[in-house]
Amino acid sequence: MYIVLLVFVSLISSGCLAEFVITAHEREELGGGEAPTVGLGFNMESLLKKYGYPFENHGVITEDGYVLALHRIPYGRNSSETNETKPAVLIVHGIGSSSGDFVVLGPERSLPLMLADLGYDVWLGNNRGNTWSRKHQTLDADKNSSFWDFSFDELSLYDTPAMIDHVLTVSRNEKLSYVGHSQGTTQFFALASQQPDYNDKVNVMMALGPAVYCGNMSNPIVQFLKDYYTVVELLTSYLNLTEILPHSLVIETALKLVCKDGGEYQEACPIILFILFGFDSDQLNRSDIKVLLDTFPAGFAIKELKHYLQLVKSNTFRQFDYGILNNMAKYNKSSPPEYNVSLVTAPVALYYGQNDWLVGMADVNRLADELPNVVEKRLIDYEYFNHIDFILAKDVASMLYFNVINKLNEINGFAPIISTSTLSTSATSTTNESGSTTSPDNTTSTEDGGRHTGSASSLNKMAHIICIFVAVLIFVI
């Protein structure tokens, strides 16, 4: 059964269901004009125009030939095009995600749209291999496995600097503000530690769920895969798996049927998200999942997943491990070089959740201790805030985005939009190992904001048991 499951995944991942998967040839040329339509008809430009926002589609070619899509929202709903230079913000998604995930829920819960309305020149990045960036000057994403030979090493070496340079050139700014979620933070910290001049191109790095150190990642499925990393290597090589979870009409249609409002199985729909990111039933609107499926998942390389499993296993932040012999050939040493985050001199603001199964609080604390220029370290004031809540939480604006916007406004010379005096911050409190906070006067309080009861804790424990059971069952069967 285990082999059958992997073969099925490989069929979807490798594009054998080609007639159902959105291929590179079905996408419009990048470099201007309307954004390509994906899935069952989602169109970035049409969505933004529906809400009253302008849209530009930019094509950026990396040094190694990948063609990336940069989506620009140059001004907000109540503004018009001018020659005025505005502060530029580059927002970069996490693994398996895309620019679309940041806007599908509309202006009231979209950080990019909020920023555009406040006068920012907003840019949304798309890493190589996702729905919008499946083109290359010589390689075909659907035919050449070498297209998928990348991890976040290549994203940091090629994609991130290409996007930053393009934004600065077009927006006529000397610096930009960078907002990253998950892998969007990983690639920035890797870049800034390897190419110091990019620290001078960023006036602040806003890290949402910073995935750098991963040794305390609590997701039981990830822990299971980490323990059987050799098996993962052998099976993916044997099955020639290079891509995973591209945006498929088959998957999207099936999931939308399951997740439809009022459907018999709608309550089962959130389980997938919870198993991956952490349980937070209160902040998840079931109807939002169906909307998110317009753009998510967006596809990524198997090698990206392997790289994160290596980080979990090694508890380090380092380049891809090719094995002793190949490491000697590539790095001239038996183990891969580590990224030195103490060389990241750009101002950094860290935002993290207490219930994030992919980014542990201890790992964020370690990162904060090693970074030389942390301007804010904020633990979200909600006990069950998880990894997908950075995008999908019902109250994400009040829980997170207002704080992010105020920090961006402070850096870019704008007035604050809301007082943050009532919101918790690690600048005035620290988190102890039990998940409580100790304020400057040494008083201790839990940071659940009074929003949850003990039943949620029981649900979390049950979730871990279910995840472990499913992982073991898949492996044994």
Image: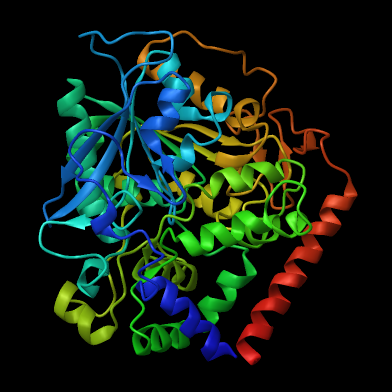
Q: Is residue 229 above or below residue 420?
A: below
Residue at horizontal 74%, vertical 54%?
Answer: 266
Please say whether residue 212 is visible from this viewpoint: yes
Q: Is residue 398 above or below residue 256?
A: above
In this view of the protein, which residue sits in the foreground, 208 or 371? 208
Which of the 4 quarters of the picture holds residue 414? top left
In this view of the protein, which residue sits in the foreground, 263 or 331? 263
Q: Is residue 200 left or right of residue 37?
A: left
Image x and y of residue 138, in percent: 10, 62
Image x and y of residue 223, in percent: 58, 73
- Quarter of the image where the C terminus is located: bottom right
Q: Is residue 214 above or below residue 429?
A: below
Image x and y of residue 391, in percent: 55, 40
Residue at horizontal 52%, vertical 30%?
Answer: 110
Image x and y of residue 371, in percent: 40, 43
Q: Is residue 436 left or right of residue 238?
A: right
Which of the 4 quarters of the picture holds residue 169? top left
Q: Is residue 310 left or right of residue 403?
A: left
- Quarter of the image where the N terminus is located: bottom right
